[in-house]
Amino acid sequence: MLIDYKKEFPLSSAIIPSKLCGLITPIGLDPQQKIEVACWLESDKHATTLERVQMQTAVVFEGSEHPLGLYNEAMNGGVVQYGSCVDEKACAAELTPSIRGLDYIVASWGDGSFFSFNLAEKVWMALGLTPRCIGNEHQKLIFDDLGLPEFGIAEGEVSSEYYWRSQRNICWRMSNEYLRKYLWLRGARAVRVFYYQTVVADQKELRELMEEQKEITIQPNSGYKWYKLDLREHEGALMIQAWAAVEVAQCELCPQPQANGLVWPGIEGPMTFERANALIEPNYVYLDDKFLERYEQNAFYDSTPSKCYGEWDCGPSYKGQWSFTDCHRVGRNLIRVPIRELYQPKPDREIIHAHKHSLEPSERDLVNQTSEHIAAKTQRLIDELLRLGENLSALGACIGLEEKTTKDLVGFTREELEYRGWSAHPPLCRLAQVSPVDMTQQSFLARCKTLHEIWQKIPDGYLKRLLEKAGCPRGELKGLRSMKLLQALANVLQQLNSREEAVDAFISDDEPLGWNSRNETLSVLFLNYDLRVADAHESAGSAISSLQTMGFDIARLNDGYGLALDFVVDGVINAFKVLNLAIEDLLE
């Protein structure tokens, strides 16, 4: 049973310094709490109150008593190993750094001038942690659990120097969940061993403890002597010094939510791994596709959608460690997945995350399951752009321009996308990310910017050479960009097709009539550009007015901008479809 340290310590809650109070307080079971497991602190010389702390955390096995005099280790400069071995052969043959024969959480070494710190080898190897280093002159080590992944499990500074005063403070913190997991794996408990010093104003309560003496040392009268308190006069004030060994954590894991026993909508009774694995018939659950946002917005996960056997798979995965399988999009914002697949090996927290986005059958039935989702729209856009690249290449070849591949014109090819998917083209992945109906204006504008980024790769120079062949004045083409060039090309092609001309009629010395006039079908490209500019300059008002002009009911924006994004993407796809049809009609 843990000692009531606060009750037994001579300083009452009214006079004990807050830092000292924290040092003698046991750790709770909150898995999110970051626990200080080692520190070497000295307050700034200009601070109103001087404080020094040297602290380490020792690992004491269950069933064993506190080693006598353990708090004396706090006098050893606040480090596990003090000083170097004598410079003789085999002098370190039996070197086993320890805190009075005990393991530790943070390994540390010092010689009075130079000090270094690192997470103990047994800790990071038992927990399977991976280190990374940040900073330049003031470097810091951070340990991550890349198997989940979980970041910032433990972190702290790597070194310091002492010359009259400390060069910088050292503080190592560790996740309470992982600290307790390590103790549980070792069958041990954590004991905080520390030295604390501060200077405070003269106080009546402290004078009473000093019993009218200039200095006094206080220790427990009976039982385990876990502390030594020294009170003394110091330059018109009182100095408090404390050495202590406090058991702060027992061999007990932090409580964690479990996937076993979750009750899923539409499935009777709690679900367990064993029950899910025994299922033969597919029992489907439906998830809101916001479930994917966590994975789409973190580069550590792969959440690129893919189409297989006529269905869109959207199961996120993590570096071959685990994955969601058979997650298929249904309708605009639903994901259907067999419960058996949800309970295939993966961290419990991922299954719990999916459970938070599960929908009741009544909610699912309200959704139109035939609506097109954003991944399918992205694929339609890709199809039209590939078709446009092939058509522009063919048109150029027919009129004598240099040969251009589809990749030269639109940035990707069918073969590349079939082999590598969209992963090699981040803008495609960003466009295909979850598009909720209640999308924010900022997210809508950012997505429109991505849409514009995808199609504006068509080289202006190639379009200008096409239009020059058609008779458009070079001087007037000089200042035009992709949108107006595509519009001009559409005007020329539609005029030729209206007269049922052949492709050789495309080459002309005469300026085509109305080649630079407004084309309503391609006006959505200009809207897309305006929305892209609105994202950069925070001027969405005019672009929203353009939406209304083009026929979108802006009253629907009260529910969010998701449907507005559908409107813009569909418009851009249709614009390229019309342009493709015009080129194909001329080439026939």
Image: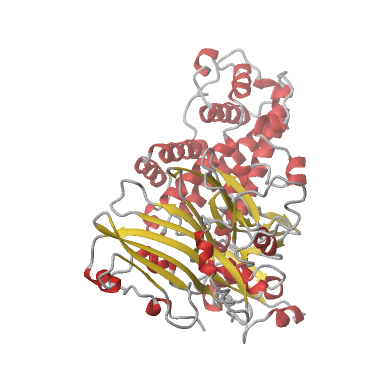
For the point 43% across and 78% down, the residue is 220
- Tally of marks: 0
Q: Is residue 51 above or below residue 89?
A: below
For the point 52% across and 72% down, the residue is 366
The extreme front residue here reads 213
On-image quarter of the C terminus: top right
Nearest the eye: 30 or 468: 30
Nearest the eye: 302 or 77: 77
Residue 247 in the image, given as x and y percentages of width and height = 51, 74
Nearest the eye: 307 or 526: 307
Q: Is residue 62 above or below residue 165?
A: below
Residue 22 in the image, given as x and y percentages of width and height = 41, 67
Taking the image as drawn, is residue 201 in sight?
A: yes
Q: How is the image coloured?
A: secondary structure
Q: Is residue 380 above or below residue 352?
A: above
Residue 323 in the image, given as x and y percentages of width and height = 70, 62
Residue 434 in the image, given as x and y percentages of width and height = 55, 56
In the image, taking residue 412 as reference, residue 6 lies left or right, namely left
Taking the image as drawn, is residue 287 in sight?
A: no
In the image, taking residue 473 as reference, residue 313 lies left or right, namely right
For the point 69% across and 38% down, the residue is 387
In the image, taking residue 371 as reference, residue 241 lies left or right, namely left
Q: Is residue 307 above or below residue 231?
A: above
